[in-house]
Amino acid sequence: MTNIHDIARLAGVSVSTVSRVLNNYKYVARDKRESVLKVIEEMKYTPNKNAIDLIRGETRTIGVILPYNNNPAFDQILNGILNKAIENDFSITVLPSNYSKEKEVEYLQKLKSKLYDGIIITSRANDWETIISYSDYGSIVSCEYTQHKEIGCSYMDRYSSYLDAFQLFKNKGHYTVAFTTARLESNSTRQMIDAYNEIFGELQPEYHISGCHCLEDGYEAAGQFLHLLERPTAIYANGDEVAGGMYLYAKSQQLKIPTDLAIIGQENQPIGIGMGISTVDHQLTKIGEQACSLVIKKSREKVKIPYRIVERDSV
């Protein structure tokens, strides 16, 4: 089997020159480059990627820990990561975790083994102390804020966005307000509950439903909320697909939007645009782009992405 030493001998150059050609370094004499490329073509030589990675000290591959796919919010973050990776000639490996602590550690071990130049954590199950212990082996960037100096982050101020959404409802005259979340035990859920309590007072348990991810979940949640003795006049959904389900249920009950029920969704997704649902846009694509840039630059910066509230016909 042909190897790099054979290429060097047949081309009449040094092994280091062959290495520079394989790694596409600019500063190689034209005649030497042409000689090496000619031998490579004649010998039908395919370079060993792992060997090249070892030579240049990087894989140009980034791992992305993603709790699950087929989720519009995570799809937006991943889209941003892919945009920036393609722009900079990096490869992306998606690492599905399903919020398993063991899976996350398994992926971080691969960073330690130099399979990736860095890892982006879109959402996590492990505590920061566990994650930080791997930061010496490559760049780790989070898509949520962390004060730990070892971890870079691209994030938005979720708490302030929740305050603004609930305040918008209150300004429109709504005081009986419900909301949905994806996971009961998560930082974003805790922030939403705290924001609710600040605007409306102590949350009554019946006005919060967790485990909502899709249109069907929103439809079911609306059914539960709207059959309460004191039904909410407004609902904040943790995603525009969830909000779309609520919108469809309300319509099925001949309720008028927003007169009988006001709805705010999240992440400015196509279904919300099509239905005219107001939304809190956390600009997740930009968060993904910035997270990828931080890994490429090996930066531990804290980059805040602004959110915006888009008012449409549902409030």
Image: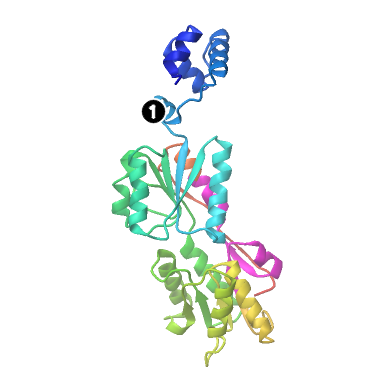
Residue at image position (51%, 39%) is: 91
Q: Which residue is mark 1?
A: 54
Residue at image position (55%, 56%) is: 75
Callout 1: few (<14), some (14-19), or many (20+) C-alpha neighbours within 10 Å?
few
| Circle 1: residue type | Leu
| Above or below, 226 relative to 99 | below
Residue at image position (46%, 19%) is: 2
Q: Residue 248: x percent and y percent?
A: 65, 78
Query: Does 260 appear in magenta?
Result: no
Q: Residue 210: x percent and y percent?
A: 46, 74
**Near-viewer residue (290 or 92):** 92
For the N terminus, the quadrant is: top left
Find the magenta span and give its range. Answer: 263-291
On the image, which quarter does residue 16 sit in?
A: top left
Q: Is residue 259 visible?
A: no
Q: Residue 10: x percent and y percent?
A: 49, 9
Q: Is residue 156 visible?
A: yes
**Near-viewer residue (151 or 14):** 14
Furthest residue in direction top, as rendered:
12
The secondary element bearing badge 1 is classed as helix
On the image, which quarter does residue 301 sit in?
A: top left
| Above or below, 130 relative to 312 | above
Its colouring scheme is: rainbow
